[in-house]
Image (spheres, helix red, strand yellow):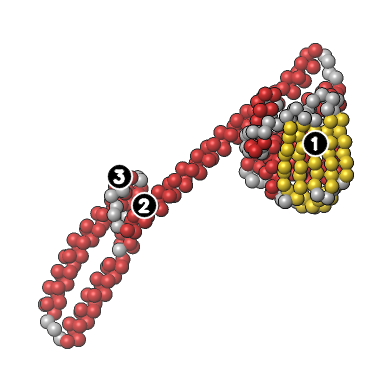
Amino acid sequence: MLRDFFREYRWLYLTVGLTIALFLGQFSLYGLPMSYFLFSLWLVLLILAGLSTFLFLSFRRKMLALAHYDREFLQDLSEPSERAFLTLLAEQAQTYEEEQSQLTQRDTQRQAIIKMWSHQMKIPLSALSLMVQTDQLNPQDVQLQLHHLDTYLANLLNYLKLSKQQLDFRFARVDVRQVIVDLVKAYRVQFLSQEICVAIEGDWQLDTDKKWFSFAIEQLLSNALKYNKPGGAVTISLSEKGLVISDTGLGILPEDLPRLGQEGFTGYNGHEHQKATGFGLYMTKTILTQLELELTITSQVGEGTVVTISKS
């Protein structure tokens, strides 16, 4: 601490040393009695020793207060530079507390999501276990449950990547119609089991990241199936302006529409049917925004939902 003290107040000792050297030069140049100089020197050194003791004790108290963050002592500091430092310290402490709060909240949300997804994955596992126990392994039902497991696991991994900002974009020319066709094929069992017909119209060539764009569309297609009515329909229209996914499902309450895409928001349908975590649409909106695409959702309760994706 002594070294730090002399480093902080080196200007004082340099000034005193320089002053003494100048006076010594003056006394020598004019041949003045050195006894006067020595008397003045001892007097200056005595005052300097007293001042140094006072400054060191004050410096030591400040350093200890900072080391232990003694707020009571720090609040008594009154020098302008010290008050400016305290203001900066308070701002840094507030920023740190806010960041810690956000991290804690995000960690809590992440744990809740993992818990929800774990619960979701237990459903198809239980269904498969029941099929085995009753010896009713229908290939279509087994494929459906395996697809659910694969989808839930992929969603969880992608959410963790998204939450850590680890999206790896690789832009290339993408045939959006082919992406849609591949996704419809992947969900054909769900379409058949719910007797939902699907129609794909038009075409769209887009420069984007195929993997993440496909993931975003998959979430929207999954929702169109999840909240549709048995025997309903899903229509996907493509053009150079973008794509439109229309369904004949339950629809969304007007008060829920503004909050769609917020992290963890499920809305009335998610609570009522216990089918949603609210993070699929959140990931979709986040990914599309980073891909410079705009997501718009309109809906009418009881009539269905229209989702539009267009260039920003």
**Left or right of 64 on screen, residue 133:** right
Whether residue 284 is visible here, answered yes or no, is yes
Q: Is residue 120 above or below residue 84?
A: above
SS of the residue under disc 2: helix
**Left or right of 112 on screen, residue 186:** right
Quadrant into which the N terminus falls: bottom left
Q: Which mark is residue 246?
A: 1
> In whole angstroms, how far apart are the C-alphas of marks 2 and 3?
12 Å
- Is disc 2 surrounded by few (<14), some (14 to 19) or many (20+) residues within 10 Å? some
Nearest to N terminus: mark 1 or mark 3: 3
Whether residue 118 is visible here, answered yes or no, is no
Q: Nearer the viewer, residue 122 or 176?
A: 176
Residues marked 1 and 3 touching at CB (< 8 Å): no
SS of the residue under disc 1: strand
Whole-percent x, y for residue 181 in the image: 86, 39
Q: Which residue is mark 2?
A: 86
Q: Which residue is mark 3?
A: 72
Nearest-to-viewer mark from 1 and 2? 1
Whole-percent x, y for residue 10 in the image: 31, 66
Nearest to N terminus: mark 2 or mark 3: 3
Residue at left 72%, top 22%? Answer: 123
**Picture quadrant of residue 296:** top right
> In whole angstroms, how far apart are the C-alphas of marks 1 and 2?
58 Å
